[in-house]
């Protein structure tokens, strides 16, 4: 009788959960059968040590109200999936009112785009995410607004308007002259493509918009006094609004473009001022900056201003590793990057990634080679840094920017299309379609899927503290072994792991002369042989991995 009552109550709970609603409270990790490994790692206890963030392009992720557009209710409904996967935080692309589909030209920084839902929906998302131990960070665009933002529509009406100094203006016939004579703050060179005409009001002036005429740049004035400018105070107020609601931090868009010079100290100094103001509101606030460049030495000085920066250079170097089967130097590259970052900030957070919403998707960038995509995931999730996963990477979504950025922002595939009530329909996909790939539900059941690789290595990173946040080092004899092997050590508080990746299409043997405790995990059925008390060898199939506990 007691069993029947329990079943009946569970059935009622299931009936009460309509689309977009989920039972409250964290769920323990499910037991996962892992046939892609022959070795036994420790079981994950549910603690998310790995610090793994997941980027959500809101419009494409999950449709919670059947209007074809991804929304906040859809994200909330899928938080249990992200929690089970082992995600520690989510980054939402802009959720604010905007004339564009992507939202990077904002009309109102304190509101939510109607298509995405209501503030009540957002509050529910925050509550659910935090109950699962998932942080929420929002995209914040500091460089520019939309040209339909009330600040800008007021600013162009006349030269004495209170919002005139929020933006950068110069007379139509003397833009270059004004820049040369330092009458235009924040810029020291003239680029005609960045100056745009005004159709009404002060039409004898042009305004600066580095990205396009839809995105007028904000004017923070001279860097020495930027913190006193009205736009700076307004952006602090914007952050304060969202922090008061419980947001954990922000991803700051295009930080190298706030001031025109990418290489001067102006942008790092600006970010330092902004970060210090936000820390007064939330001492543990998390900020991560985007500086899209392939030179990590140029990114390094931005750590003067922010605790975390995305590392595009690490991804570009990893592409070279995978495409050329030349892996052994990569751990050395990572240690040199971290050392450079640390010269500007102790504890600098190296935000690592594969692709994101502005880049060709990982699988497509790697010529649709699933073995390379799996290898990329294994390396991302075993090396040092704070990993970000772009939505859909874990199921091998594809996309090339050719033909438009929409093609790398296509709808997520949850179920077969005939039964996928959460799949968005705002954009007709070109690359991520079921003739090319399986949806999540099928990949969960496929032991050889890309999803299974992400699931496996996320759990390993969450299980082993050394893999999550330990130091990284590499063997002294880099010159002595084959270039296709990537070998490194992760260590924290006495726990020491050895990771070996074979990034080539050939079976290879690696021999090393130090003792190991035991192999704890592999990918690709690696054969481990203990030759004597100090000498060991591994025979590694193509695109395989093994992790030892030392």
Image (spheres, rainbow, N blue to C red):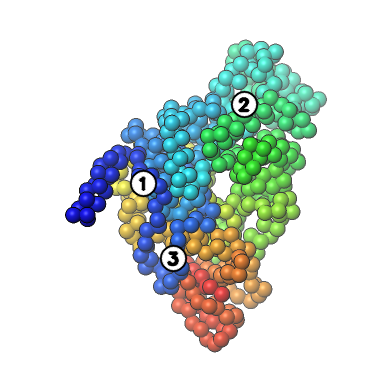
Mark closer to the chain start, 1 or 2? 2
Residue 136 in sight:
yes
Q: Residue furthest bottom?
A: 532
Question: In the drawing, what numbered circle is on residue 216?
Answer: 2
Residue 134 shown left or right of residue 300 in the figure = left
Separation of disc 1 and disc 2 at Cα? 36 Å
Residue 413 shown left or right of residue 203 in the figure = left
Separation of disc 3 and disc 1 at Cα? 29 Å
Q: Residue at x 67, y 54 (%)?
A: 347
Q: Residue at x 58, y 70 (%)?
A: 496
Q: Looking at the picture, does residue 236 appear above or below residue 443?
A: above
Q: Residue furthest front?
A: 2
Residue 528 shown left or right of residue 186 in the figure = left
Q: Quadrant of the C terminus?
A: bottom right
Kindly indicate the quadrant of the structure image that contains residue 185: top right
Q: Residue at x 40, y 60 (%)?
A: 452
Determine which residue is flagged by label 3.
43
Question: In the drawing, what numbered circle is on residue 413?
Answer: 1
């Amino acid at each position: 009788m007691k069993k029947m009552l329990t079943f009946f109550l569970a059935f009622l709970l299931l009936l009460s959960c309509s689309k977009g609603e989920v039972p409250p409270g964290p769920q323990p990790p499910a037991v996962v059968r892992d046939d892609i490994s022959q070795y036994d790692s420790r079981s994950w206890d549910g603690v998310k040590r790995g610090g793994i963030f997941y980027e959500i392009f809101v419009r494409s992720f999950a449709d919670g109200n059947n209007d074809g557009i991804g929304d906040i209710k859809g994200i909330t409904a899928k938080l249990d999936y992200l929690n089970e996967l082992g995600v520690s935080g989510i980054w939402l692309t802009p959720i604010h009112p905007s004339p564009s589909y992507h939202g990077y030209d904002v009309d109102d920084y304190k509101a939510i785009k109607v298509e995405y839902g209501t503030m009540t929906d957002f509050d529910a998302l925050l509550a659910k995410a935090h109950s699962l131990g998932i942080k929420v960070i929002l995209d914040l665009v500091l460089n520019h607004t939309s040209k339909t933002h009330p600040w800008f529509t007021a600013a162009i009406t006349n030269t004495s308007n209170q919002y005139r100094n929020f933006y950068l203006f110069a007379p139509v016939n003397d833009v270059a002259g004004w820049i040369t004579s330092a009458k235009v703050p924040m810029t020291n060179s003239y680029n005609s493509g960045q100056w745009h005409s005004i159709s009404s009001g002060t039409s004898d002036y042009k305004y600066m918009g580095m990205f396009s005429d839809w995105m007028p740049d904000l004017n923070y004035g001279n860097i020495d006094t930027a913190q006193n400018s009205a736009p700076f105070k307004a952006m602090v107020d914007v952050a304060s609004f969202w922090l008061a609601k419980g947001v954990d931090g922000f991803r700051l868009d295009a930080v190298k473009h706030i001031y025109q010079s990418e290489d001067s100290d102006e942008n790092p100094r600006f970010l330092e001022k902004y970060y210090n103001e936000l820390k007064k509101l939330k001492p543990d606030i998390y900020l991560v900056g985007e500086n899209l460049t392939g030179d990590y030495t140029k990114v390094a000085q931005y750590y003067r201003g922010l605790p975390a920066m995305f590392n595009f250079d690490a991804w570009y170097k990893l592409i070279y590793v995978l495409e050329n089967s030349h892996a052994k130097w990569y751990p050395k590259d990572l240690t040199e990057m971290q050392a450079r970052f640390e010269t500007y900030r102790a504890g600098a957070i190296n935000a690592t990634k594969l692709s994101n919403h502005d880049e060709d998707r990982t699988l497509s960038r790697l010529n649709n080679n699933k073995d390379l995509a799996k290898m990329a995931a294994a390396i991302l999730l075993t090396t040092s840094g704070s990993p970000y996963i772009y939505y859909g990477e874990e199921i091998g979504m594809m996309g090339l920017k050719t033909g438009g950025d929409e093609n790398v922002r296509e709808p997520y595939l949850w179920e077969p299309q005939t039964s996928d009530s959460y799949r968005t329909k705002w954009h007709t996909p070109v690359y991520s379609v079921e003739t090319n790939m399986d949806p999540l539900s099928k990949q969960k059941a496929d032991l050889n899927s890309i999803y299974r690789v992400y699931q496996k290595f996320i759990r390993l990173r969450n299980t082993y503290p050394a893999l999550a946040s330990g130091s990284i080092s590499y063997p002294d004899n880099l010159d002595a072994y084959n270039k296709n092997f990537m070998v490194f050590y992760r260590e924290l508080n006495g726990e020491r792991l050895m990771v070996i990746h074979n990034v080539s299409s050939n079976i290879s043997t690696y021999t090393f002369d130090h003792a190991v405790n035991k192999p704890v995990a592999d990918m690709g059925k690696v054969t481990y042989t203990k030759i004597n008390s100090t000498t060991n060898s591994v025979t590694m199939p193509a695109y395989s991995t093994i992790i030892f506990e030392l």
